[in-house]
Image: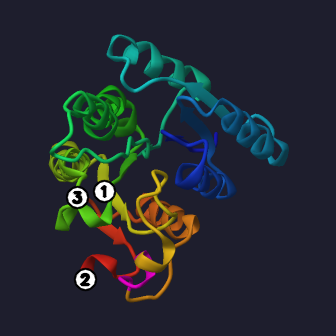
């Protein structure tokens, strides 16, 4: 049976590219999504037309803590196994200190730290049995701090620390790493323009989604890398 990869937030943008990358390398895909119903259905149709019954979708809100067990159980029912877990789903928005935004804390922490931890915990025995791997998606810029994005920065910083801690706890059977994208697409909240971004990138261009999906796939295949944060940002975090 083909190896199975679960991609959270897999219906569009970087998540979609990750799904396609693993699919073209022979994986069966479970694409998690929350509100992107149309995108998820289109991706499923597209990839299943290439290889029948190779992609399944699962809808779930990562803030719904009362139903994580049923969510994870529904995933195992799809193919009965899991080899690669990719925690890509993420909330991203600004939280300036002078605004009343503490209610945003749960959303940002849940999707970026707490959700991935719960999912890893549920699938740990399954991944261990298959000598599987976990790859988390961070953000290349959080090591410098991000003005007006303090809670998001805390969340992604927590995810990177979680990555390193789980790499120790789950070794040697399960490898845990993270990919930290830089400017791959213009921010969905419209906070930056292309000219400003490119001026701070040594390689002189915004990255492509494939730059990230290829890095994720590489980490899934290299058997001697764990506990690492791979920053794929064209050198932007050097500035």
Q: Is residue 238 above or below residue 209?
A: below
Identify the residue at horizontal 75%, vertical 34% (top origin). Answer: 53
Label disc, if present, on residue 177 of the rendered structure: 1
Question: Residue 212: horizontal and vertical position, in percent?
Answer: 49, 65
* Residues marked 2 and 3 touching at CB (< 8 Å): no
Foreground disc of the pair 1, 2: 2
Whole-number angstrom distance, CA of label 3 to CA of label 1: 5 Å
Q: Around disc 3, counting alpha carbons within 10 Å, would you say few (fewer than 14), some (14 to 19), or many (20 or more)?
A: many
Location of the C terminus by quadrant is bottom left
Comparing 52 with 239, the one in front is 239
Q: What residue is disc 3 on? A: 227
Q: What residue is disc 2 on? A: 239
Label disc, if present, on residue 185 of the rendered structure: none
The range drawn in magenta is 197-201
Comparing 58 with 53, the one in front is 58
Q: Is residue 163 above or below residue 196?
A: above
Q: Around disc 2, counting alpha carbons within 10 Å, would you say few (fewer than 14), some (14 to 19), or many (20 or more)?
A: few
Q: Main secondary structure of the magenta part?
A: loop
The answer to whether 187 appears left or right of 156 in the picture is right
Mark 1 secondary-structure assignment = strand
Location of the N terminus by quadrant is top right
Identify the residue at horizontal 34%, vertical 35% (top origin). Answer: 111
């Amino acid at each position: 049976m083909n190896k199975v990869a679960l991609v959270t937030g897999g219906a569009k943008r970087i998540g979609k590219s990750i799904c396609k990358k693993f699919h073209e390398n022979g994986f069966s895909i479970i694409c998690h999504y929350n509100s992107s119903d149309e995108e998820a259905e289109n991706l499923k149709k597209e990839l299943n037309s290439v290889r029948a019954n190779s992609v399944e979708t699962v809808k779930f809100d990562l803030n719904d803590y009362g139903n994580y067990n049923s969510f994870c159980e529904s995933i195992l029912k799809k193919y009965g196994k899991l080899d690669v877990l990719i925690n890509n789903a993420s909330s991203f928005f600004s939280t300036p200190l002078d605004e009343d935004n503490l209610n945003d804390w749960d959303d940002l922490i849940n999707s970026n730290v707490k959700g991935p931890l719960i999912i890893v915990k549920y699938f740990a025995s399954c991944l261990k049995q298959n000598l599987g791997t976990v790859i988390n998606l961070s953000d290349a810029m959080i090591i410098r701090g991000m003005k007006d994005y303090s809670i998001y920065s805390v969340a992604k910083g927590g995810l990177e620390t979680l990555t390193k801690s789980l790499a120790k706890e789950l070794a040697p059977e399960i490898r845990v790493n993270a990919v930290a994208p830089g400017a791959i697409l213009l921010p969905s909240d419209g906070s930056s323009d292309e000219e400003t971004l490119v001026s701070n990138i040594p390689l002189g261009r915004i990255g492509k989604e494939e730059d990230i999906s290829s890095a994720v796939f590489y980490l899934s295949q290299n058997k001697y890398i764990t506990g690492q944060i791979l920053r794929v940002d064209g050198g932007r975090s050097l500035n």
